[in-house]
Amino acid sequence: MEFEREDISAFASELGFDPPKNLGDVLYSFRNRTKLPSGILAEAPDGKTWIIRSVGHSKYCFVLVPDVPLVPNPNLAVTKVPDATPGIVAKYAFNDEQAVLARVRYNRLIDIFLGIACYSLQNHLRTTVPDMGQVETDEIYVGVDKSGSHYVVPVQAKGGNDELNRVQIEQDIALCANKLPSLICRPVGTQFIQDDLIALFEFESDTDIRVVSEKHYRLVPPEDITDDDLDKYQQRLSDGM
C-alpha cells in the first residue's frame, strides 16, 4: 500500500484528531526505531512483518519482509582485540551509536572484519537517491584489497537497546549504487552487545536483506590476550573460519 507524507494529516483530520506537527519524525520513528501499532502488525501473515519503504520524495509504501530480527547471535564465538581506543575517549563515551562508531574506527574493526584496508570517508552522509528520496547513513568507509580493487562500506551503528533494521541497510545499498557505482559495496552493521563487546554484520540483498557473516569482538588490554587465545585463533584460521 503506497501513501504520501501529507496523507497522514488528511487521515488524522478524517479521524477527528489533530495531525502530528512533525510528520517526518513520525515516519522516521516507525521506519527506524519504534514498532508499528499492533493493529498493523496483526495484518501480516505468520513469519512476516511490515516495513515502510521510501519510494520517492515524501512517498512511502508498506512491504512484507521475513520477521527475523537483525540481532547478535548469543552463541557466536568471541575474538579478543587489543583495545586502541584513546583513554580519554573511553572515559567520556556514551552508550550510543556514536560511541560504537568511535570504537570501531579507533580499533580498525572494519578492516579486521572485512579483511581489507578501510578508511573513514564521511560521517552521517545525508543525500537523495532516485525513486527513494532522502537517505542517511551513519558512516561511509572506502577500502582497497591486495589486488587493488576498491570498496565502499556503508555502516549502520546501534547502541543501547536499538536494533539494526532492514530499511536503513536497503537505503545504504541504494546510496552506494547511486553515488559510488564503480566501487564494490559491502554493507556493514555494528552494535554494542556490552560496553567492550561489539558485534559486526556484513549484509547482502537479493529479495531481502541477508546476513553474510557475523563476528563478535571484545576490546581488551593487550596483556589479556593469552597464548591459549592465540592458539585458538590460529586453529580457526587453519579450519577456514
Image (cartoon, rainbow, N blue to C red):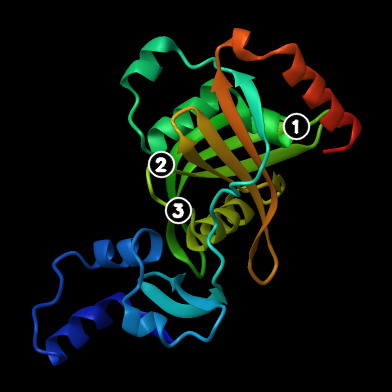
Residue 147 vertical placement versus 39 (above, below): above
The residue nearer to you, when weighing 225 against 37, is 225
Q: Which residue is tagged 3?
A: 163
Instruction: Pinpoint residue 234: horizontal percent, then vertical percent.
Output: 84, 24
Q: Which residue is mark 2?
A: 159
Q: Is residue 158 left or right of residue 115?
A: left
**Residue 167 appears at what percent x and percent y?**
49, 63
> Residue 56: which quarter of the image?
bottom left
Tell me if I can see residue 53 in this picture.
Answer: yes
Q: Amino acid at mark 3?
A: Glu
Q: Earlier in the sequence, mark 1 or mark 3?
A: 1
- Which residue, given by chain and number where applicable, does mark 1 sit on? 115
Residue at disc 1, secondary structure: loop
Where residue 179 appears, x then y in whole percent? 58, 50
Q: Earlier in the sequence, mark 1 or mark 2?
A: 1
1 or 2: mark nearer the eye: 2
Quarter in which the N terminus is drawn: bottom left
In the rendered image of this protein, does residue 61 appear above or below residue 147? below
164 left or right, relative to 117: left
Quarter holding the C terminus is: top right
Question: How far across and down, in percent of the image, does residue 81 sit?
Answer: 63, 21
Crowd rating for badge 2 (residues with CA inside 10 Å; few <14, some 14–19, many 20+): many
| Furthest residue in direction bottom, as rendered | 14
Question: Pointer 3 and pointer 2: residues touching (CB < 8 Å)?
Answer: no
Q: Residue at x 49, y 34 (%)?
A: 122
- Residue occupying image coordinates x 70% and y 13%: 226
Q: Amino acid at mark 2?
A: Gly
Distance from disc 3 to disc 2, alpha carbons, whole Å, reads 8 Å
Q: CA distance from mark 1 to mark 3?
A: 25 Å
Q: Residue furthest top?
A: 223
Front residue of 154/102: it is 102
Disc 1 from disc 2: Cα separation:
24 Å
